Amino acid sequence: MEDVREWVRYVRPGFGDDLLRYTGMGEILSFGCHDMEGVRPFTVGADARDLLATISDHLAAHDWPIHLHAILDSTISTVLDVWEEVDRRHDLSGRRWSLAHAEPISRDNLERVRRLGVGLAIQNRMMFRSADSAALWGEEVAANSPPLGDILDMGIPLGAGTDSTVVSPHNPWPALWWLVTGQSHDGAPARMSRHRLDIEEALTAYTRGSAWFSFEEGSRGHLEPGAHADVAVLNSDPFTIDPEDLPSIRSDLTLVGGRPAHVGPPFSSLTPPNG
């Protein structure tokens, strides 16, 4: 708690520039609330819950967004209990608080997330852990995790990512393959079809959707006047390629702020990075 107080004393949310900016606190605020990979039984103790409540209240009072790791639905329930208490004192609407992972989240907790205005950041870590997860959660829950169809239908902010670099490489295309196909690499059955995204939905979650979490949906995640000129010219069209081949997509040219950051052979005549 002392670390949080000192952080709040010296740093304001939004400090930085377009390449590196402090946007919130997380992914772990109270280690006793950290349910790791969500593949072993876990209970949040009273002391850990109280610490999370104290930290969350302090951050809300100083306008800091929170991005919190929570996988098991029981952990999510405890976090939402705490955040509903904070909401009664500080009103969390518009603050862009969010849960990371949250794959087995129940319908009841999705309703609570929607009421609080909380976003869900979903990564492709289950591409490697579906079978392990099913062993604890049950096969039916695992087959519907994450409940992407429900999240979109309910209008809950959804951001996609990779949970890099410990869990997965930062390459987005395997993650997009997982979002679209629902398959994994560990032999588990594919995710139910209603919780698989089409490529447009997956790309939207990865771009415009993720920009919501850092208050940057006006300048990131879309190609429109006034937005950042960050562009990738791909070697294949993700809208026409076989979804099974999505992981093979590469960038032939990447522009950041309108300047080349990566130049592949088809564009070798352009000024190279740092050139």
Image: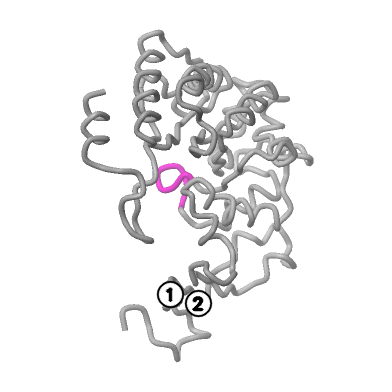
Q: Position of residue 148 (x, y in %)?
A: 69, 39
Residue at the (42%, 78%) spot, across then down: 260
Residue 79 colored magenta?
Answer: no
Number of the label disc, if any, that sits on residue 262: 1
Residue at the (48%, 37%) spot, across then down: 95
Rendering quarter of residue 46: top left
Residue at the (53%, 71%) spot, across then down: 231
From the viewer's perspective, is 16 left or right of 220?
left
Q: Residues within 10 Å of mark 1 (few under 14, many from 20)?
A: some
In the image as oriented, which residue stretches furthest toward the right? 194
Q: Is mark 1 on a helix, strand or loop?
A: strand
Residue at the (49%, 21%) spot, across then down: 79
Query: What is the spatial separation of the Cα atoms under label 2 and label 1, in whole angstroms?
Result: 6 Å
Counting the numbered discs, the total is: 2
**Residue ID for mark 2:** 253
Report the magenta stretch's main SS.
Answer: loop
- Tell which circle, 2 or 1, labels the residue nearer the N-terminal end: 2
Range of the magenta residues?
Answer: 163-169
Q: Is residue 118 above or below residue 74?
A: below
